[in-house]
Amino acid sequence: MDLHYSDDDLAFRGQVRAFLAEHLPADLKHKVNQHKRLQRADYVRWHQILARQGWVAPGWPVEYGGTGWSPVQRHLWEEECARAGTPPILPFGVNMVAPVIMAFASAEQKAYYLPRILSCEHWWCQGYSEPGAGSDLASLKTTAVRDGDHYIVNGQKTWTTLAQHADMIFCLVRTDTGVRKQEGISFLLIDMKSPGITVRPIEMLDEDHEVNEVWFDNVRVPVANLVGQENKGWTYAKYLLGHERTGIAAVGRSKRELAFLKRYAATRQVDGVPLLREPLFGAKVAALEIELMALEMTVLRVLAQARAPGAEASVLKVRGTEIQQRLTELMVEAAGPMALPFDPVFLESGSEQAIGGDDDAAPLAGYYFNFRKTSIYGGSNEIQRNIISQMILGL
């Protein structure tokens, strides 16, 4: 693989930078770079800006609204967005359910759902995990019983990110209890406004409402909302998770956060010397930067493959999340006691100055705690190591 960008790639990078400089709203950039909380309107506004440009789904085939960019260009796009401080495009619609719809759904389903994902008319959430089925996802118990032209869905999903805002949920349900557990699962698309759905917030340590419980009580779902074949949902679920795990690596975001860490550590003094120049701390930062560079090269190799990501996505997920967590650890270490004050008013953008006066440090403790989850979601890192050992190493 050529590790140098071509002249065309560098010209593309310049085009992207010019677009972001002109179109990224200053208030959104400020929120992202200050680690403040984003609201639903923030995500939707940025999504719709990109949709008008035709750049909201770079990984999609052109016939469905994709950009036709090369893997390297898609990588540069994500890197430049992170560098500029854009809100993320939420993955549940564009990067998770959309590839499943493209690969396995009917023509009618594609024609209906894909344009609404592109426009953000539909905000999606993911109905996978249950109280007794997280890493062992195939043990899920939410049922869907056929009743004429509908399924009757009963059960519970948990850790459902941003379900309080969602219009639709893609859901794994059990449609056959008499077979091997992986073989009795189906993939349903469910309207979150359906009677019988209840969303209950799960409030985190930092008092943020990011995840939820979702309850289904005799929810009627049209059979037309079944993706692919009944009882083949496990195949579709694994396909989706490959796309999710590749995205979880988030190299661009980690490069932005590494730059933040280095800037912040350069302003912190230890015995009159900037913390970044303190040998032990500086060595930790340097080692992490080397690991991030190696991850970036690995991501580019995976993206260059002319096929859907396979077991190698597990490698990206493990290394990507470990690097993200290490970054947040070093941020808190750099901030020291300045990371202790808890200031939800500042994080919600209702205040222009944090308690204690250190705007950079104020969000870092909450940021650290929030990133403890990354090694669990998308399939825990322990499960990913099992996949690597079986599918790549042949153990």
Image (cartoon, rainbow, N blue to C red):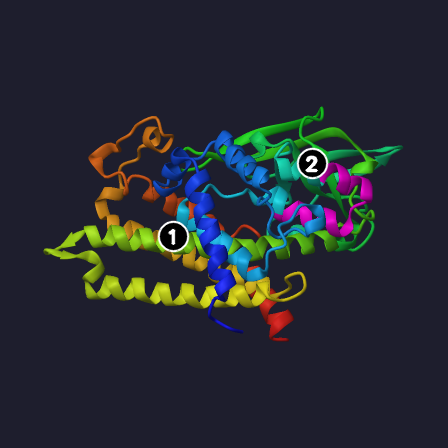
Q: Which mark is residue 7?
A: none
Is 219 situated left or right of 324 in this image?
right
Residue at 75 percent across and 29 percent down: it is 218
**Front residue of 274 and 57:** 57
Residue at 26 percent across and 37 percent down: it is 341
Residue at 30 percent across and 53 percent down: it is 261
259 in the magenta segment: no
Q: Residues within 10 Å of mark 2 (few under 14, many from 20)?
A: some
Residue at 57 percent across and 56 percent down: it is 245
Q: Is residue 22 visible?
A: yes
Residue at the spot of label 1:
256
Q: Is residue 62 above or below residue 168?
A: below
What's the residue type where badge 2 is placed? Gly
Q: Main secondary structure of the magenta part?
A: helix
101 in the magenta segment: yes
| Secondary structure under the numbered disc 2 in the rendered image | strand
Q: Position of residue 248 (x, y in %)?
A: 52, 53
Q: Could you tell which of marks 2 and 1 lies nearer the N-terminus?
A: 2
Q: Residues within 10 Å of mark 1 (few under 14, many from 20)?
A: some
Q: Is residue 331 above or below residue 6?
A: above
Quarter of the picture holding the N terminus: bottom right
Residue at the spot of label 2:
155
What's the residue type where badge 1 is placed? Arg
Q: Position of residue 130 (x, y in %)?
A: 62, 43
**Front residue of 303 and 235:** 303
Quarter of the picture holding the C terminus: bottom right
**Front residue of 377 and 291:** 291
Q: Position of residue 181 (x, y in %)?
A: 75, 53
Task: Please provide the residue range marked out in magenta.
Answer: 95-113
Q: Farthest bottom residue?
A: 394
Q: Is residue 250 visible?
A: no
